[in-house]
Image (spheres, grey):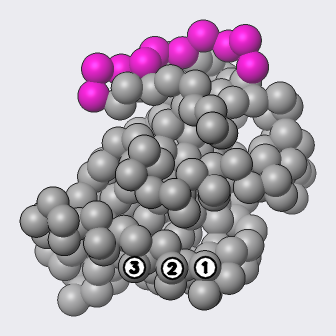
Amino acid sequence: MLSEYNTNGFYTERGFFSERHMDELRDEVDSITQTKGLLFLNEIQIHKESPTIKEIIFDGVLRGMINKFIGNHIPIQSQLRFKPPSTDGFPYHQDDYWTQAGFGNTMNVLVHIDEATIDNGCIYVIPKSHKPPFHEDRVYLTANPGDITFLHNYVIHGSDNIDSKEFRRNLLLMYVKEDCEFKKGEGAEREMITNG
């Protein structure tokens, strides 16, 4: 796990959350979407509206894994993406561009709510791109509901357009090392999330 993450800049834990748990989360997400009358959702700090997401953020086993990757940390952002068919992808990027926290000081955890396939625009990553030089081709991070992916903040990644009739929902959680400065961002509104 740790070796794979340090070498490639990402790691996927299969079946971390049960399908039943993801079914409950999907129902809650869909309820939020319907309440807002949205066909596309890119909601920042969604934990303020979702008790299930708040529980996921502070899941003890998840936090223990994050400790192994980056040490003591605090959660600072939750973001829900609900992408319908024909949605555009997102170009290559590094997450630290937005936080400016420095190499390895933040981590994004991607919770796959729906199945992630190449056709429905799953994330792709360039392995080892967090530690140049690198000479790798992109790898598609296909996943089943309940899988979670840990992304290094310097690894280069993106996503393609959705070319299928499938929706793809995912939850992005960001954690930062304790006592590390980061950009809050006007739209992202990053801040310490408390379990209260």
Kindly report the distance in space between the C-alpha atoms of the residues bearing marks 1 and 2. 5 Å
Circle 2 Cα neighbour tier, 10 Å, few/some/many (<14 / 14–19 / ≥20): few
Residue 24 in view, yes or no? yes
Circle 1 Cα neighbour tier, 10 Å, few/some/many (<14 / 14–19 / ≥20): few
Predominant SS of the magenta segment: loop
**Label 1 is placed on what type of residue?**
His
Task: Tell me whether circle 1 and circle 2 mark residues in contact (CB < 8 Å).
Answer: yes
Circle 3 Cα neighbour tier, 10 Å, few/some/many (<14 / 14–19 / ≥20): few
Q: Position of residue 64 (x, y in %)?
A: 86, 48
The answer to which image quadrant residue 187 occupies is: top left
Look at the picture and state if 165 lies above or below 66: below
Q: Residue furthest front?
A: 196
Residues in magenta, as a range: 178-187
Kindly report the distance in space between the C-alpha atoms of the residues bearing marks 1 and 3. 10 Å
**Mark 1 residue element:** helix
Q: Position of residue 170 (x, y in %)?
A: 44, 65
Kindly report the distance in space between the C-alpha atoms of the residues bearing marks 3 and 2. 5 Å
Task: Tell me whether circle 3 and circle 2 mark residues in contact (CB < 8 Å).
Answer: yes
Q: Earlier in the sequence, mark 1 or mark 3?
A: 1
Dot label at residue 24: 2
Residue drawn at x 55%, y 47% is 173
* Viewer-nearest residue: 7 or 174: 174
Residue drawn at x 52%, y 57% is 51
Q: Position of residue 6 (x, y in %)?
A: 80, 44
Q: Position of residue 73 (x, y in %)?
A: 75, 30
Dot label at residue 44: none
Q: Which residue is mark 1?
A: 21
